[in-house]
Image (cartoon, rainbow, N blue to C red):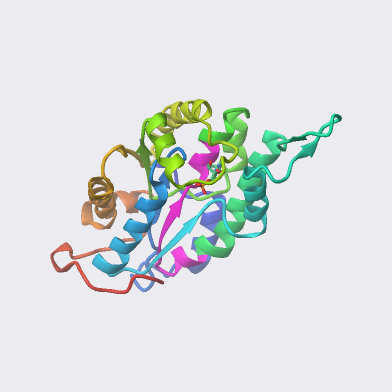
Amino acid sequence: MRAPGPSILSARFFKEKRPEGDDLVVRGRFIVFEGIDGSGVTTQAHRLKEYVGKKLGLPVHLTKEPTDGPVGGLIRTILAKRVGVPTRDGRLESVDPRCLALLFAADRIDHLEVDILPKLQNGVTIICDRYYLSSFAYQSLSVDLKWIREINSKCIHPDLTIMLRVPPLVAEKRRLQDRWHVELYEETPKLEHVSANYLSIIKELQREGHRVEIIDGNRPPNEVHKDVVRLVRSLFTTTGNKKARARGSPQLGIDFASEGGGSADA
Ligand code: TMP
């Protein structure tokens, strides 16, 4: 099945700015990393940024969700359990999961408008540490998935989403090495459910034509990075371009024989 076209938000954006037919400005690629807490998403996102910038010589921007913007800041305080709803007996309960789902969606729209879309349109490749698939996998622990998809329906679809699959107990060990406090979702039983959610939702997205790939993240970072590079290169080759064009993205050609050099940041 053909991949779905861009959402209303992106269609409006790209129609206004895209040049007629030519390769004057080429939209950058939009790549997302996903996985449970402790799966190595942040490490791999940084390594890919280096690769795209230095080896491919393309303008690249690394970003993440929740963002550092106004809504993202609020989400972070909720995740850190520093704000909540007071109960009658004086305890603090976390905010209603539906509110949290809306906050993640609001943060995402802000992220797209302020940061992602303008850069993509200027030819910058975006690497995003978490995006709407995180909302689907985490918030659906307690909120209806159909509704979560609905409130994210104005968000553009990534060209490629890579999910790093790591057993929840391995992820727990990794988290214990570098975390000082436990955030809202950082409990292994919860993350076991999130992990199962990821797998079933990814199947659903793949059936709908979205490009979502699963990589075994339970290996040394170098090996994982090699698989990531293999997937990402296909976005910039002629065959990958044909598929991208079928999805409505303009062409971007890289001569991999002369790969190397170039600036790392946009
Ligand atoms: P991180 O910054 O360490 O990746 O933590 C972000 C946390 O927020 C992580 O537990 C996943 C969670 N999250 C959601 O529940 N929904 C979302 O839409 C996003 C982007 C993150």
Can the viewer see residue 60 in this picture?
A: yes
| Residue name at image x 36 percent, y 74 percent | 24
Q: Nearer the viewer, residue 106 or 241?
A: 106
Q: Position of residue 242 (x, y in %)?
A: 27, 52
- Whether 61 is drawn above or below 74: the answer is below
- Residue found at the far left of this picture: 257
Q: Quadrant of residue 212?
A: top left
Quadrant (top left, top right, bottom left, bottom right) of the N terminus? top left
Q: Nearer the viewer, residue 85 or 147?
A: 85
Q: Is residue 124 magenta?
A: yes
- Whether 254 is drawn above or below 9: the answer is below
Q: Nearer the viewer, residue 32 or 86?
A: 86
Quadrant (top left, top right, bottom left, bottom right) of the C terminus? bottom left
| Residue name at image x 24 percent, y 66 percent | 55
Which residue range is magenta in the image?
118-136
Q: Position of residue 50 (x, y in %)?
A: 32, 63
Q: Is residue 243 left or right of residue 73?
A: left
Q: Position of residue 230 (x, y in %)?
A: 23, 49
Q: Quadrant of residue 260?
A: bottom left
Q: Is residue 264 magenta?
A: no
Can the viewer see residue 248 in this picture?
A: no
Q: Is residue 79 left or right of residue 223?
A: right
Q: Is residue 57 left or right of residue 13?
A: left
Q: Position of residue 228 (x, y in %)?
A: 28, 48
Within the displayed image, which quadrant is ligand 1 positioned in?
top right
